[in-house]
Amino acid sequence: MKTIGIIGGGQLGRMLAIAAARLNFRTVILEPQADCPAAQVANAQITAAYDDPAALDRLAAQCDIVTYEFENVPVSAAERLAATRPVYPPARALAVAQDRVTEKRFINDCGIATADFREVDDQAGLEAALIAFGGQGVLKTRRLGYDGKGQKVFRSAADSPEGAFAALGVVPLILESFVPFEREISIIAARAIDGAIVAYDPAENEHRNGILYRSTLPATLGPDTVEKAKAAAAAILSALDYVGVIGVEFFVLADGTPIVNEIAPRVHNSGHWTEAACVVSQFEQHIRAVAGLPLGNGARHSDCVMQNLIGDEIDDVPAWLARPDALVHLYGKAEARPGRKMGHVTWLTGSKS
Ligand code: AMP
């Protein structure tokens, strides 16, 4: 029986480990936090930092293939493992996704639109970039931002940039032009070792406090937008010689044009609906891809809504369990802190429309 190493022990690693077990793979989790969500359902955990060389060598020794569940895995860690074991998705996908400037340049080089952007390395640079964008824009850290953290929005010239460079930590920033989007969607897609690609239907995503709240299928989109978004995801996968599942987030303009916001080289929260509304979920698809198995059927059989259970919304589980249309999935986290993703629920809203 083959063993898959998973770097990162959160809920995404947990759901990957469950999918791996269903296909007769063993899993080993590398994660510094003991008794993490993934290790609860895996065969073993190496409790160490993601960049601990001895731990990485132990992981390589115990596994046939290595993958990961979050995009901030140190590139050096992926490269160290890749010297002796297949590591999927490739380390280059991490390098691209970890820096918003590198990411946008890469996406633009694929012929795909993003927000206009400027690199910001100091307060004077911020002020010049804001003037260029008419006083509007979204200022973000280039690296290590997630769920809207490390961001500041400038809605009009009345929003002063004073102190903003310092407030975001005196680190390299990016100013993005403000995209007047009508909706936000994402495409979850997979690429196999032989280059085959399967893309799931786009989900329409609603955020609250910077965190994904709901994904709805189908998204309210014309067929043209769906095709363009799927084609963009496929182009990104091929350009990275990617293996595994990727999440591609888009803004959709009023005229239906999709603009890439960001990519996540991993299974994605906005793809959790696939476990309830597709024959093969994003988690199984990822395991199939990295293990060199044929990709599965990603067609959607039902309309559905996925909603995250955040913080004390975990208390609503008894009511969700009583609903005949709902599939509940919990992450094994002991403490329900505000903003913490504790689980999710997907309810089916009818046959595919
Ligand atoms: P991100 O961390 O890049 O996913 O951004 C978090 C959220 O902020 C997005 O889901 C959007 O709702 C909003 N946002 C980010 N960038 C922009 C932008 N350039 N224009 C308008 N809204 C944005």
Image: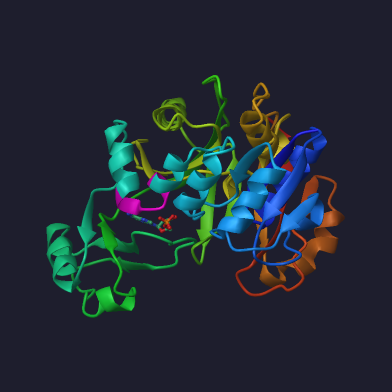
**Main structural element of the magenta stretch: helix, strand or loop?**
helix
| Number of marks in picture | 0
Look at the image and tell me in which quarter the C terminus lies: top right
In the image, 5: left or right of 205? right
> Which quadrant of the structure image shows residue 303?
top right
Horizontal and vertical percent position of residue 50: 57, 58
Q: Name the one closer to the observer, 218 or 212.
A: 212
Foreground residue, 55 or 32?
Answer: 55
Q: Give the magenta part as a residue range.
A: 96-101
What percent of the width, then of the height, locates residue 180?
A: 32, 51
**252 sits left or right of 327 in the view:** left
Q: Residue at x 51, y 67 (%)?
A: 209
Q: Residue at x 28, y 64 (%)?
A: 172
Measured from the top left, where is residue 258 in percent x and y? 37, 37
| Residue at (40% x, 47% y) in the render | 95
- Quadrant, the N terminus: top right
Q: Is residue 290 left or right of residue 235?
A: right
Q: Is residue 165 above or below residue 292?
A: below
**x and y, in percent, of residue 75 in the image:** 45, 50
